[in-house]
Image (cartoon, rainbow, N blue to C red):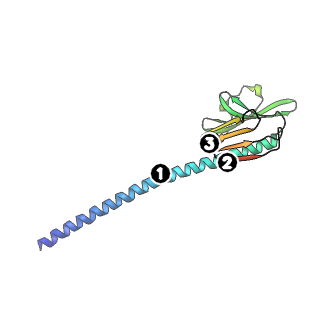
């Protein structure tokens, strides 16, 4: 009878070891899956934020598009796009730029002496820059992951906008 009890103990220990291995495997798979899910949702959020910002800037270009009133430049060391407008004989400039991980917008008189940190936060984004394409006045807006938007302001030629997945 003692042999049967001893074999039951070995069987019980074997079952417990198999159960512990199974539980550890499931826990590892769960932890890895959670990490992958978080990475994928972060990437998805960034792409959605990019599309939203691209759409916002495209709409601003369409609504502000007069000869010489849109330009790309440097705003205290930060790449920015500027929209100028004259209200009651006073020049006001709207700047859209990325500062401290946030896309920001600042409307002010250019002589007011405001800095990039003074802008209103619009949306978190990892990367955003503004350029001209070669010698033309086509605007290139590049976001995270080299996604970009090409804008052809109406003041120079017919308006076309297109989102590209790889901008070089």
Q: Is residue 5 above or below residue 96?
A: below
User: Which numbered marker is on residue 146?
Assistant: 3
Q: Which residue is mark 2?
A: 51
Q: Secondary structure at mark 3?
A: helix
Hey, which residue is sitting farthest bottom in the picture?
1
Question: Residue drawn at (44%, 53%), measured in percent from left and top?
Answer: 32
In the rendered image, residue 127, in percent from the top left (x then y), is placed at 61, 39
- Expressed as whole percent of the image width and height from the top left, the position of residue 18 reads 29, 63
In the drawing, does residue 86 fall left or right of residue 11? right
Where residue 150 sits: x, y (%)?
A: 72, 42
Q: Which mark is residue 35?
A: 1
State the residue lying farthest toward the left: 2
Q: Residue at x 46, y 55 (%)?
A: 33
Mark 2, residues whose alpha carbon is within 10 Å: few (<14), some, or many (≥20)? Answer: some
Q: Residue 8 bears which disc, if any?
A: none
Please state which of residues 147 and 62 is positioned toward the viewer in this rendering.
147
């Amino acid at each position: 009878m003692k042999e049967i009890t001893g074999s039951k103990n070995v069987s019980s220990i074997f079952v417990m070891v198999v159960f512990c291995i199974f539980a550890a495997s499931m826990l590892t798979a769960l932890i890895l899956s959670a990490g992958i899910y978080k990475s994928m949702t972060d990437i998805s959020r960034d792409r959605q934020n990019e599309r939203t910002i691209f759409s916002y800037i495209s709409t601003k270009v369409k609504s502000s598009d007069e000869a010489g009133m849109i330009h790309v430049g440097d705003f205290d060391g930060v790449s920015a796009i500027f929209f100028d407008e004259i209200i009651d004989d006073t020049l006001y400039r709207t700047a859209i730029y990325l500062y401290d991980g946030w896309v920001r917008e600042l409307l002010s008189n250019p002589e007011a002496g405001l800095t990039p940190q003074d802008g209103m936060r619009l949306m978190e984004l990892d990367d955003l820059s503004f350029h001209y394409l070669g010698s033309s006045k086509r605007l290139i807006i590049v976001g995270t992951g080299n996604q970009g938007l090409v804008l052809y302001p109406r003041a120079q030629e017919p308006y076309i906008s297109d989102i590209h997945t790889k901008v070089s």
